[in-house]
Image: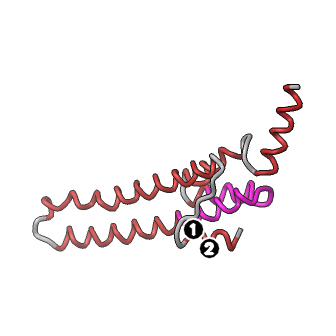
Amino acid sequence: MAGAKSSEDSKQNQQSGVGGNDSVMFLFAYLLSWISGIIVLLMYGERNKRLKFHAMQSILYGIGAMVVVVILDFIFAAIIFSTLGFFYLAWLALIPNLIGLLLWLYGMYIGYQGYTGKDVEIPFVGPMAKQHS
């Protein structure tokens, strides 16, 4: 009986797209931002619609987050170098990096939600990812 139950569970997991090795791919899609999103899209995009959505969302979110952090880096660098108190304002250079870390943690949270079976759409990026997946 135990074998029949486990085969039923695996069939159900395959139908829902959650379970086995595939469920870890939801986390991996967000781990390295857009790079791992591309890897997951190429490996699982045709086989699993949920993974394709999360891979697309990871790619779009990762590119957007990277652009935001680079723009903030330039802004804060301009503030630091344009003032006479360069050494007193050098700590401002950490702010874009902390924002980047928070954006990465949010992406990992979305990946964890996908791992547990919940699909969360990131504002602005989620609808575009759903449209392309």
Residue at image x 69%, y 72%? 132
- From what the image shows, is residue 28 above or below residue 130? above
Residue at 84% x, 26% y: name it.
2
> Was residue 38 drawn as part of the magenta stretch in this picture?
yes
Q: Position of residue 110 (x, y in %)?
A: 55, 55
Q: Which range of residues does the magenta coloring cover?
A: 37-61
For residue 128, which numbered disc appears in the image?
Answer: 2
* Disc 2 residue type (three-letter): Met
Determine contact: label 1, label 2, CB under 8 Å. yes
Quadrant in which residue 34 is drawn: bottom right
| Within-10-Å neighbours for mark 1: few <14, some 14–19, many 20+ | many
Amino acid bearing label 1:
Leu
| Magenta stretch, main secondary structure class | helix
Mark number displayed over residue 60: 1
Query: Dot 2: what SS?
Result: helix
Q: Residue furthest left?
A: 84
Q: Earlier in the sequence, mark 1 or mark 2?
A: 1
Q: Position of residue 37 (x, y in %)?
A: 62, 58
Image position of 34 with respect to 8: above or below: below
